Amino acid sequence: MDSNLNRNSRIAMLMVALSLIGGTGCVHYLMASSSSGSRNNTNPVSVPRELTAQEKEEIAKKAELAREESRRKYELEYNNLAMAANANDPAAKTKLGIEYLKNIGYFPKDVKKGIALIKSAADDGYPHAEYYYGWLLLQGEPKITDRQIKLEQGDMELSYSEGVRLIEASAKKICGPYHGAVENIPAEDLTDIYQQGKYVPESEKKSDLWFARFIMHCGGKSGFSSKKKWRLYGHEDFSDAKTLAFLYLLDNSRSPFPKYYRERASAFAATLNSEQIKEAKAIAQELRLAVRQSEQEYPDPANYKGKK
């Protein structure tokens, strides 16, 4: 009983204090809370009722209408793509070919026809098809594995030399993206291809060239590695001077974050000696010259006037 008296006294004192500062709404809440807490009050649990036969029939009809609308949508898209592909439109051939490699929606799966369509568009010089088909030739699947596309061994014959040639051909026409959900930049891929030496002989010179083109032509950006301070992601083995050289290149008009890289270059240069900075500037100048010279064979993709 004493405990109840003390509790009621505290509540009364709190009510008086709140009333002095205009907290009457809080008082009502506290009173309700106090009274509800003093007795065992449980909320009844609502049990969902069973749907009637008519309601179930209406839900089934709506689901069927949605399926029919989806089917008509896929059918229309398929027919439009097929008509454009038959008219030799390279973009339509590429997209239809990719759809044939999948097995979803209204598009039937036809690996042989899909590969043939993409190859035909690549033969036409369509850059997205060159890029896509180039990676099919290298590894038998797209660059970024699409879970909807599962080619089997023997579906197509691989060719490393032709695959790299096609990716290089696309790199002089586009920066990206290609047909798909993921953006890819051919020049950046070529950086890795020549760095890893998996499909072609390893070449530091060519890897550096394509990395420089990726930066200078496509405004490519590069993150910093968490493994080693200041190192560019994927290029942790660069020397201090070479790392700074690429930071100088990243500070260019096409980069989306020139100020950011300018600040990074300045901060990194502050940790180096004068000889290293001089070497970095010389490397950056050599890379700029190499990019300009490479444009005789692989033009700046910004100047490409064909269908992208």
Image (cartoon, helix red, strand yellow):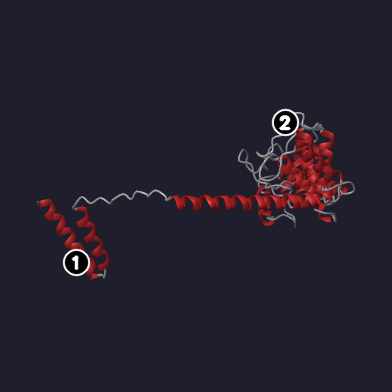
- Residue 203, compared with residue 1, is above or below; it is above
* Residue at disc 1, secondary structure: helix
Would residue 9 be found to the left or right of residue 116 on screen? Answer: left
Q: Nearer the viewer, mark 1 or mark 2?
A: 2
Question: Relative to the observer, which residue lies in front, 262 or 168?
Answer: 168
Q: Position of residue 35 (x, y in %)?
A: 19, 57
Amino acid type of the residue tagged 2 in the rendering: Glu
Amino acid type of the residue tagged 1 in the rendering: Val
Residue at 86% over, 47% down? 125
Q: Residue furthest front?
A: 53
- Residue 256, compared with residue 235, is above or below; it is below
Which residue is tagged 1?
16
Which of disc 2 and disc 1 is earlier in sequence? 1
Q: Where is residue 121, by image quadrant?
A: top right
- Residue 27, compared with residue 254, is above or below; it is below
Q: Where is residue 33, by image quadrant?
A: bottom left
Residue at 20% over, 64% down? 15
Q: Position of residue 230 (x, y in %)?
A: 65, 44
Question: Relative to the observer, which residue lies in front, 277 or 148?
Answer: 148
Residue at 74% over, 52% down? 219
Residue at 19% over, 52% down? 39
Q: Position of residue 232 (x, y in %)?
A: 68, 43
Which residue is tagged 2?
152
Question: Relative to the observer, which residue lies in front, 232 or 150?
Answer: 150
